[in-house]
Image (cartoon, rainbow, N blue to C red):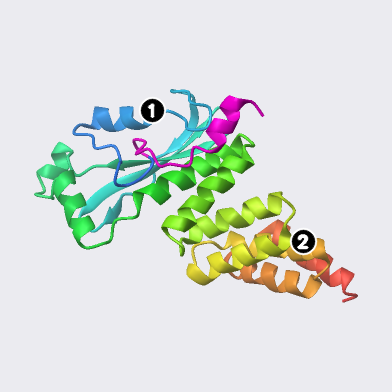
């Protein structure tokens, strides 16, 4: 590893990168600015602009009085970027007498409903680092997230993926289970646990995990096939 790469591997400080968190989301005042904020967003994996091959701005979301979109933008490099765009300041919204973005953010902070911006940013950058196979940097960023917010389910989920990639199955199992304990928003944790248990030859545990996943996604072909394979291994 070069000295430059080594320095980069230690860069785990959140930098208030525009668009990577709701707090630092883009705040367009016109629809043209709204379109430009996503089209010209810098991919955090390859650091290029205007390279998106697919994009979905998704449904309008709310956080307190904040109105926003969380756009999913897949770059030509293969990385999926998520970009926050706050729309409170658009003219059509102001005509409805909604709070300005500054007012809505201040209120969300006072009510303690605004997501922690450092963890939102660091998790996205951790995913970009893993995409670029800089797993050391990715792990450092996830660890920093858990230092800031110890009960962050997405950070525990990412830790599970990184531990699996390292072949550290006990740590991966612990991390995925922690993510499940903290939130119901990570059904893939059950799927990943199923694959780990299957790899370890713990077929009943694998069946239980795959079945948990299939309860939400009953038509998932891979999980269904894995259940059949595990039952065959058990002689059923």
Answer whether residue 154 is visible to the viewer in this image. yes
Circle 2 Cα neighbour tier, 10 Å, few/some/many (<14 / 14–19 / ≥20): few
Relative image position of residue 205 (x, y in whole percent):
74, 73
The residue at which mark 1 appears reads as 39
The residue at which mark 2 appears reads as 225
Tell me what residue is drawn at x 19 percent, y 60 percent. Answer: 110
Q: From what the image shows, is residue 117 above or below residue 108?
A: above
Tell me what residue is drawn at x 26 percent, y 29 percent. Answer: 33
From the image, give the main secondary structure of the stretch colored magenta.
loop
As rendered, which of 5 and 62 lies closer to the eye? 5
Relative image position of residue 217 (x, y in whole percent):
60, 63
As rendered, which of 83 and 120 lies closer to the eye? 120
Count up the numbered dots: 2
Q: Earlier in the sequence, mark 1 or mark 2?
A: 1
Answer whether residue 218 is visible to the viewer in this image. no
Q: Which residues are magenta?
A: 1-19
As rendered, which of 71 and 149 lies closer to the eye? 149
């Amino acid at each position: 590893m070069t000295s430059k790469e080594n320095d980069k591997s230690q860069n785990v400080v959140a930098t208030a990168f525009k668009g990577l968190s709701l707090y630092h989301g883009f705040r367009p005042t016109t629809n043209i600015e709204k379109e430009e904020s996503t089209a010209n967003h810098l991919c955090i994996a390859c650091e290029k602009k205007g390279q998106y091959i697919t994009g979905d701005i998704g449904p309008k979301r709310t956080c307190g009085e904040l109105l926003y979109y969380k756009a999913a933008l897949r770059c030509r490099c293969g990385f999926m970027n998520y970009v926050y765009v706050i729309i409170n300041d658009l003219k059509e919204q102001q005509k409805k007498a909604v709070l300005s973005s500054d007012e809505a953010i201040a209120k969300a902070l006072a009510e303690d409903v605004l997501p922690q911006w450092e963890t939102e940013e660091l998790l996205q950058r951790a995913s970009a680092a893993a995409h670029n196979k800089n797993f050391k940097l990715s792990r450092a960023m996830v660890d920093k997230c858990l230092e800031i917010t110890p009960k962050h389910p997405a950070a525990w989920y990412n830790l599970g993926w990184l531990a699996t990639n390292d072949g550290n199955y006990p740590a991966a199992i612990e991390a995925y289970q922690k993510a499940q304990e903290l939130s119901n928003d990570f059904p893939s944790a059950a799927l990943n646990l199923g694959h780990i248990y299957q790899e370890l030859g713990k077929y009943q545990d694998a069946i239980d995990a795959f079945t948990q996943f299939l309860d939400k996604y009953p038509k998932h072909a891979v999980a269904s096939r894995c259940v059949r394979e595990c039952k065959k291994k058990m002689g059923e």
